């Protein structure tokens, strides 16, 4: 019996050793820098026998991308990033989708939920994709973030204390305007549209309609540094941009120094300034940041001459298909503001979505040393991914991250729209009075955009390489 137990135990240990050998690279620890070989990954995906290392599907575990190195000697493109706990791992499929959008279709990733002519009747809006990202996880994630932006703006998602919803800001501004005109608001109620019937027949004294649109974008411009065969994202932050339209006329929302910002500008600024805090409450926003970074790398490759062969990825790699909706329901809410003068303000909002010398120089901005670190740390030319030994690198593109290893102490109209209709009702009633918000109200035209249009600020500075520690030592000896 004892010998039998030893026999099965030995078989178990042998099995573990074999499985660990078959898995390829060992898992790299959090807070490590990672290099990922696009050539080796492509070769694995081309094999009929299948991928030999599952890390190929997650870019070796990279969660924040920072750049890439073109290794012409080995005909390779090496992605560079960091593995950070709490952030989603990059997906190989997302990289392929972005590469195809930019390099095969010459298009840009985009998703928008547009109000169309039939929306007032059907209550449905059209979902529009660009860059052929529909039916992909890339497109699905883009769409989910647009939906989040819409729902948050209408206070249909849990709010965080530092970011008020657009509808709250809209009503707050209306209350301030009333008080400034000498009218005391008695109360505010948010009700279902069907609850307005008791107000039918009241004379409409004034009214207005406009459409505020919000979309995710890069802070304009995002910054990269290019040096020989090294491409490094120095700064790429996500922001919200906005546009205000009425009857297809764009309002100039430039705010004078002494003027109160509109609700749309307030919401845009609050969401942008608190993007990383919102990302903690809504993890899908972390994925959005990663998708924008991937698109930046795709743009960099598109503009690189004599690239190593990635034709299989552009033409034949089978991207996983998922369902992405073609329509999205319109959401309507209404605020009733009772006034001290007996009149009533109605506001309807309709939601649409649219440590070495080299490291000192690397921290000083000379990204050329990335190539040295990446190539010299590669175990062999067929390694899929590997750890880069630069734990004390002050990594660019790190806004929103808690970096533990620091040694020293545009036009992407991807988003949502909110149509606002407001009326002031008098006390008297009339046969020609208010009968609900009209079903044939005008909507602004769909946003005309090609999606994530990249506007880079490129710094190709060359650095004078000086052995700073050697010079310091020489001065000390003197």
Image (cartoon, rainbow, N blue to C red):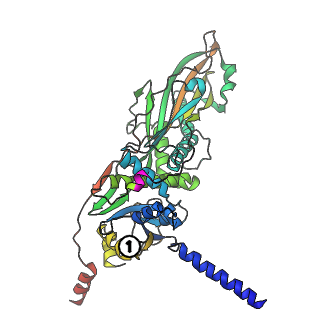
Dot 1: within a 10 Å radius of its alpha carbon, few (fewer than 14), some, or many (20 or more) residues? few
Indicate whether 99 appears above or below 266: below
Indicate whether 378 appears above or below 447: below
The furthest residue to the front: 48
Could you tell me residue 347's position as x and y percent?
58, 28
Q: Nearer the viewer, residue 109 or 51?
A: 51
Q: Which is the main secondary structure of the residues drawn in magenta? A: loop
Could you tell me residue 352's position as x and y percent?
54, 34
Quarter of the picture holding the C terminus: bottom left
Would you identify the image quadrant in which residue 197 lies? Answer: top right
Is residue 79 visible from the viewing direction of this image?
no
Q: Nearer the viewer, residue 347 or 296?
A: 296
Q: Secondary structure at mark 1?
A: loop
Q: Residue at x 45, y 50 (%)?
A: 97
Is residue 86 visible from the viewing direction of this image?
yes
Range of residues picked out in magenta: 312-322
The furthest residue to the top: 431
Indicate whether 265 appears above or below 462: above
Could you tell me residue 229's position as x and y percent?
29, 63
**Would you say residue 315 sits in the magenta stretch?**
yes
Would you identify the image quadrant in which residue 249 lies? Answer: top left
Q: Residue at x 41, y 71 (%)?
A: 382
Left-right relation of 178 to 15: left
Q: Residue at x 45, y 39 (%)?
A: 265
């Amino acid at each position: 019996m004892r010998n039998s137990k030893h026999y099965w135990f030995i078989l178990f240990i042998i099995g573990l050793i074999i499985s660990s050998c078959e898995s390829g690279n060992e898992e790299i620890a959090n807070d490590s820098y990672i290099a990922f070989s696009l050539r080796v990954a492509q070769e694995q995906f081309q094999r009929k026998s299948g991928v030999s290392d599952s890390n190929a599907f997650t870019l070796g575990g990279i969660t924040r991308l920072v750049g890439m190195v073109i290794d012409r000697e080995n005909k390779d493109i090496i992605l560079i990033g960091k593995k950070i706990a709490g952030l989603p791992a990059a997906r190989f499929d997302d990289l392929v989708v972005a590469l195809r959008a930019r390099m095969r279709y010459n298009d840009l990733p985009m998703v928008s939920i547009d109000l169309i002519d039939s929306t007032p009747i059907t209550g449905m809006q059209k979902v529009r994709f660009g860059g052929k990202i529909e039916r992909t996880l890339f497109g699905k994630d883009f769409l989910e973030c647009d939906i989040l932006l819409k729902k948050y703006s209408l206070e249909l998602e849990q709010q965080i204390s530092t970011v008020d919803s657009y509808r709250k800001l809209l009503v707050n501004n209306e209350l301030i305007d009333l008080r400034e005109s000498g009218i005391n608001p008695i109360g505010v109620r948010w009700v279902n549209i069907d609850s307005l019937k008791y107000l039918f027949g009241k004379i409409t004294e004034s009214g207005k309609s406009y459409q505020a649109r919000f979309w995710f974008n890069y802070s304009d411009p995002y910054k990269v540094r290019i040096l020989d065969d090294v491409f490094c994202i120095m700064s790429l932050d996500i922001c919200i941009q906005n546009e205000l339209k009425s009857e297809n006329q764009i309002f100039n929302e430039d705010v004078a120094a002494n003027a109160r910002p509109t609700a749309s500008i307030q919401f845009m600024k609050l969401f942008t300034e608190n993007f990383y805090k919102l990302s903690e409450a809504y993890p899908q926003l972390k994925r959005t940041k990663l998708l924008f970074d991937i698109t930046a790398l795709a743009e960099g490759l598109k503009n690189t001459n004599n690239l190593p062969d990635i034709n299989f990825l552009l033409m034949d790699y089978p991207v996983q298909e998922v369902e992405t909706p073609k329509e999205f329901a319109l959401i309507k809410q209404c605020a009733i503001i009772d006034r001290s003068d007996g009149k009533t303000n109605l506001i309807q909002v309709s939601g649409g979505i649219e440590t070495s010398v080299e490291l000192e120089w690397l921290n000083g901005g000379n990204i050329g040393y990335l190539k040295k670190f990446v190539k010299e740390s590669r175990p062999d030319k067929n390694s899929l991914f590997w750890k880069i030994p630069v734990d004390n690198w002050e990594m660019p593109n790190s806004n929103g991250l808690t970096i533990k290893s620091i040694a020293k102490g545009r036009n992407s109209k991807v988003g949502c729209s909110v149509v606002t209709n407001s009326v002031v009702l008098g006390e008297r009633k009339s046969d020609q009075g208010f009968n609900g918000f009209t079903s044939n109200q005008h909507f602004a035209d769909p946003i005309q955009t090609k999606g994530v249009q990249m506007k880079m600020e490129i710094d190709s500075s060359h650095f004078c390489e000086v052995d700073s520690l050697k010079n310091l030592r020489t001065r000390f000896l003197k």
